[in-house]
Image (cartoon, rainbow, N blue to C red):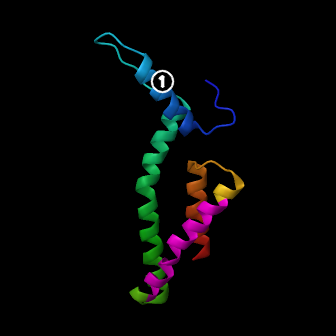
Amino acid sequence: MNTRGRDMGNVMVDAKKVITDSLKLPSGYSYIWSGQYESKVRAERTIEIIMPVVFLIIYVLLFFTLHEYKEAGVVMLSVPFALIGGMYAVYILGYNFSVAVWVGFIALYGIGN
């Protein structure tokens, strides 16, 4: 299957819809999605766990540096604004949201703080 010009997530949404609507499997048969899509789903699950842990670690490091939880919290308030700005930049540049983009957000936030 070729995903040229489209992101893999939207292609898979369309493919799942076509398969669900068109394919009638006999009882006892099933199908699974694999390859890059399987890796993408696995990476997304990992990122869902890692992102909060990374933000917690950053908060703890800020607390140890600033010696006050309120100041560390104020610095952490920049996270939503940074994410919003990053989302706009990704949208304006026409990039697809991928694991690499989320890793970039984590890295930039770590550098920014």
Magenta stretch: dominant secondary structure = helix
Which region of the structure is painted magenta?
71-89
The quarter of the picture where residue 9 lies is top right
**Side of 52 relative to 4 (left or right):** left
For label 1, the residue is 18
Residue placed furthest toward the front: 21
Q: Which of 6 and 74 is in front in this view?
A: 6
**Side of 81 relative to 89 (left or right):** left
Q: Residue at x 48, y 81 (%)?
A: 62
Q: In this view, does 30 lie above or below 54?
A: above
Q: In this view, does 103 lie above or below 16?
A: below
**Does 87 appear in magenta?**
yes
Q: Position of residue 38 (x, y in %)?
A: 48, 34
Q: Where is residue 7 in the image (x, y as percent from the top left)?
A: 61, 39
Residue placed furthest toward the right: 93
Q: Where is residue 14 in the image (x, y as percent from the top left)?
A: 52, 31
Q: Position of residue 37 (x, y in %)?
A: 52, 34
Residue placed furthest toward the left: 27
**Side of 38 relative to 5 (left or right):** left
Q: Alpha-carbon neighbours of circle 1 within 10 Å: few (<14), some, or many (≥20)?
A: few
**Does 38 appear in magenta?**
no
- Report the quarter where the N terminus lies: top right
Q: Is residue 51 above or below residue 112?
A: above
Q: Which residue is drawn at 42% across and 16% down?
A: 23
Q: Residue at x 61, y 59 (%)?
A: 104
The quarter of the picture where residue 90 lies is bottom right
Residue 44: in sight, yes or no? yes
The quarter of the picture where residue 59 lies is bottom left
Q: Is mark 1 on a helix, strand or loop?
A: helix
- Report the quarter where the C terminus lies: bottom right
The kind of residue tagged 1 is: Val
Q: Residue at x 58, y 62 (%)?
A: 105
